Image (tube, rainbow, N blue to C red):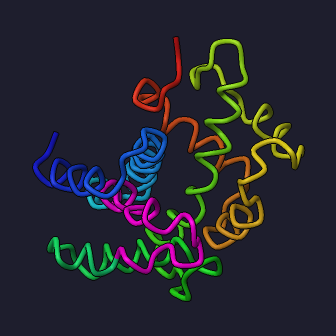
Amino acid sequence: MSEAREKALALVKEHNREEGHIQHAFAVEATMRYFGEKKGEDPELWGLVGLLHDIDWEETQETPEKHCSLAPQWLKDAGYSDEIIRAVQAHGWSICSDVEPLTEMEKTLFAIDELTGLIITTALVRPGKSLQDLKVKSVKKKWKDKRFAAGVDREIIIKGAEMLGVTIEDLIDGTIEAMKPVEKELGLGE
């Protein structure tokens, strides 16, 4: 584990105690690293943004409109760059933040945050509870059932895919692939 990741994880755990929130941070981190590398960007930076993106969630979950409001100061105090702080704020655009995703990193985080939850929930209802054999069509089938993973805002995912200029299917496929290597850390697999 790199020193930068170790520092970020310690900060995340300082503010988040629930295992599900830590697992979500790992899912988004892995997905951001994957897409950062695919786009020829710095996977370490993208991974840190993914790991840190919901740092203030446990403090604001009772008032979700305040999500992304505590994170900037916490991250600044911990010495994180404006680039990381802005990306964390931009993932809540149109929900709890007016910071619009502009860079590829910001747009990717915006697009995949909710999607990781839908994919994990889809894997959990399968016999092996694994990502290893999960297909895009299985996720798309669950996508259509609005009662399944009802908390996942599919419109945000659609908007994110459009910002990135990719299909929903390609975004789902890449997100599944990104999370496969860390499925044990996500509470998946046998």
Q: Is residue 44 left or right of residue 100?
A: left
In this orientation, which residue lies closer to the viewer: 182 or 58? Answer: 58
Does 66 lie within the magenta span?
yes
> Percent from the top left, x then y, of residue 159?
71, 70
Question: In which quadrant of the rendered image does the N terminus lie?
Answer: top left
Task: Tell me where the magenta segment starts and ends, as one range.
Answer: 46-71
Residue at (49%, 29%) from the top-left corner?
180
> Percent from the top left, x then y, of residue 20?
48, 41
In this orientation, which residue lies closer to the viewer: 20 or 4? Answer: 20
> Percent from the top left, x then y, of residue 71?
35, 74
Does 90 lie within the magenta span?
no
Query: Which quadrant of the view contains residue 63?
Result: bottom right
Residue at (41%, 63%) from the top-left corner?
53
Give the mark count: 0
Q: Is residue 99 above or below residue 185?
A: below
Residue at (56%, 44%) from the top-left corner?
175
Residue at (42%, 38%) from the top-left corner?
19
Query: Which quadrant of the view contains residue 86?
Result: bottom left
Q: Is residue 68 above or below residue 54?
A: below
Q: Is residue 77 left or right of residue 176?
A: left
Q: Residue furthest toward the bottom?
A: 98
Q: Residue furthest toward the front?
A: 62
Q: Residue furthest toward the left?
A: 3
> Percent from the top left, x then y, of residue 97?
54, 83
